[in-house]
Amino acid sequence: MTLKFIDVASYQAGLDLSKVQTDGVVIKASEGIGYVNPYCDEFFQQGLKLGKLLGVYHFARNASGNTPQKEADYFIQHTKGYIGKAIPILDWEDKNTGDVNWALQWLQVVEKAYGCKPWIYMSEYVENSHNWKKVAEAGYGLWIAKYRDHVIDKNWDMKNAGPIPTVKYWGFYAAWQWTSSLVLDGWSGKLDGSIFYGDKNAWKKYINNETKPLPPKPNSTKYKVGDIVNINGIYVSKDSKEKLKPAIASGTITKIYPESRNPYLIGNGTGFVNDACITGIHSSKVLKVGMMAKPKKAVLYDGVKLDSSVTKKSYKVIEIKGKRVVLGDGLNTAFHIDNLSY
């Protein structure tokens, strides 16, 4: 399941949350050690009254020479009334995005005050460019940004959202900001639009210091974590119904959600697949002419069926052209490479 949320700052002053379609709102609270959003509490109280999911963020000015302790204290001072009601978030976009220790210290200070683990917001590029291992392993949730373009996206239509973000250090991300050009009925300006990978209870668990999900129950899924699988389709979430064309032909299963529609997470956030998307286990061995290969199914490259006896033995590979592989030893017939074990 996914939920939709927007983030707002002083630029959105006058926006009426009751008139726009959103499950939640993340509000800019502070920046550096000298700015407080004058509209923050107005947005917060309206969102609270409407039952919206809430978050509040601090825009880091670490490149200005401020210490993480001072900026964390400043954020806490101006948001202490929101503790237990919203997810605290560090907006990591200042010039020195490689100062991972600064970010970690800010998160640790705010965690102690809020009693929950904050999120950190950053772009896909920033996550991929620096070593975030210690932040990810400490359990701080990731809200990641990646846009395909800046063309207007109307009323949460994600058909032009583009490929989902790929991350290196988190096993999964809590939310994806997929557009900065969202236009919703009820507001004339553009908004940032994000999806949260979970339901309302999952959001509330982040507020109540339960950022790490419980271990999955023992399951009887066909594939296991660590399997490298060939795929012919992919989904943006574990519950999505819209199958997309994958940008990769194979990937590693890194996590399994056994009760979900698409239980297998591929890579560190590449996407989700189900049994129907998987065409088989990927072999890391490169098939070459002269090697032995055995057909998995008695089906030729062009779809014609053969007698099942051809799957009982291996044959020498005599020709390879792309995915088309010809087996010799008297068979002299072409098969699809994904239909061969070798």
Image (cartoon, rainbow, N blue to C red):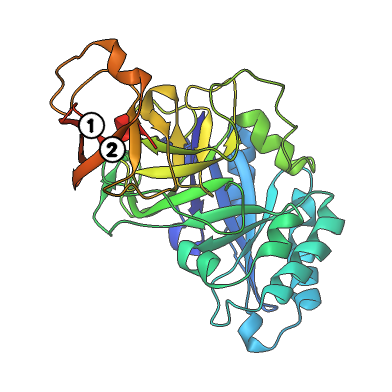
Q: Is residue 32 above or below residue 207?
A: below
Compute the Cα span from label 2 to label 1. 6 Å
Helix, strand or loop under label 1: loop
Q: Residue furthest front?
A: 330
Question: Disc 1 marks which amino acid?
Answer: Asp
Report x, y in % for residue 234.
37, 36
Residue with the mark numbered 1:
329
Compare residues 274 and 117 and report the one nearer the observer: 274
Report x, y in % for residue 11.
44, 63
Helix, strand or loop under label 2: strand
Question: Disc 2 marks which amino acid?
Answer: Lys
Look at 51% across and 66% down and name the residue there: 128
Q: Which corner quadrant of the image does residue 127 belong to?
A: bottom right
Q: Is residue 318 above or below residue 39?
A: above
Q: Which corner quadrant of the image does residue 316 belong to?
A: top left
Contact check, label 2 and label 1, Cβ < 8 Å:
yes
Q: Is residue 207 left or right of residue 303?
A: right
Look at 48% across and 63% down and name the residue there: 123
Look at 72% across and 84% down and name the residue there: 66
Residue with the mark numbered 2:
316
- Which image quadrant: the C terminus? top left
Q: Is residue 75 above or below residue 95?
A: above
Look at 37% across and 28% down and name the residue there: 277
